[in-house]
Image (tube, grey):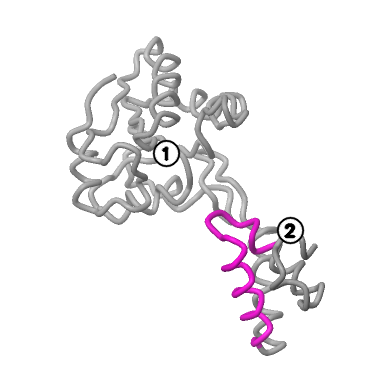
Amino acid sequence: MAGRYGDDMNSTALPLIQLSEQFARLPGIGMKTAQRLAYYVMTMSDDDARAFADAIMTAHSTVKECSLCCNLTENELCPVCAESSRDHGIICVVENPKDITAFERTNEYNGVYHVLHGLISPMDGITPDMLRVKQLLSRVGKGVREVIMATNPTVEGEATAMYISKLIKPLGVKVTRLAFGLPVGGTLEFADEVTLFKALENRSEI
């Protein structure tokens, strides 16, 4: 164990090492940060530590995918799909649930969403059948006028957008792509509201 993480772990209690390893499995968390988080947990009171663990277990057991758009929700339908005032004829296709939050911050988009839960990436072994593409296609024939491909402007995002557009266009539904006010290689999560709104407003057909 020490050989993997260095000499600074030699005197660390095994439960702390195991806790650090679990934190390190989270995206964007390196081993040093994971160790700091593990040590911080040790400063919590028993009640706080229990509440932290309970929150993880509750979220894991109660949050599920929306039966319509595949967003994460604790109900059958997410709040967006359940809102009758939204324009259900326009679907904005995003990679992850957190991208919906970015669009909602603009307060300008009134359509609905579809979450793919990933992007096509043969190098990483991610194929189209591993995404929520079939669920999207099942929605397209139900009064949908436009599908906005809002995947990130990366190689994988572009490949996914083109793949899905080729499946949808024969169905007679308009398919558009976000305008490239977004930086190439950037992610929607960190785009400011104005840039994201302009990208949405100036989308082009593909």
Q: Are marks 1 and 2 in contact (CB under 8 Å)?
A: no
Question: What's the CA distance linking mark 1 and mark 2?
Answer: 37 Å
Quadrant (top left/top right/bottom left/bottom right) for the N terminus = bottom right
The three-letter code of the residue at mark 2 reads Arg
Please identify the residue farthest to the bottom as the structure is shown: 45
Q: At 67% from the left edge and 90% from the top edge, which residue is drawn?
A: 45
**Place of residue 100 in the rendered image (x, y in percent of width and height, measured from the top left):** 40, 48
The three-letter code of the residue at mark 1 reads Val
**Place of residue 61 in the rendered image (x, y in percent of width and height, measured from the top left):** 70, 58
The residue pinned by badge 1 equals 94
Of the two numbered discs 1 and 2 on the same chain, state the one appearing first in sequence.
2
Quadrant (top left/top right/bottom left/bottom right) for the C terminus = top left
Task: Give the answer, above or below, for where 6 lies relative to 155.
Answer: below
Of helix, strand and loop, which mostly describes the magenta segment? helix
Report crowding for label 1: few under 14, some 14 to 19, many 20 or more residues within 10 A (C-alpha). Answer: many
Q: Is residue 32 magenta?
A: yes
**Place of residue 166 in the rendered image (x, y in percent of width and height, measured from the top left):** 41, 14
Which secondary structure, mark 1? strand
Q: At 62% from the left edge and 28% from the top edge, which residue is drawn?
A: 125
Q: At 21% from the left edge and 47% from the top edge, which residue is drawn?
A: 195
**Range of magenta residues:** 22-44
Q: Is residue 82 magenta?
A: no
Task: Give the answer, above or below, for where 47 lies relative to 24.
Answer: below
**How many marks do you count on the picture?**
2
Which callout, 1 or 2, points to the residue nearer the camera? 2
Figure quadrant of residue 75? bottom right
The residue pinned by badge 2 equals 4
Report crowding for label 2: few under 14, some 14 to 19, many 20 or more residues within 10 A (C-alpha). Answer: few
Task: Give the answer, above or below, for where 121 lies relative to 173.
Answer: below
Please identify the residue farthest to the top as the structure is shown: 170
**Place of residue 14 in the rendered image (x, y in percent of width and height, measured from the top left):** 82, 72
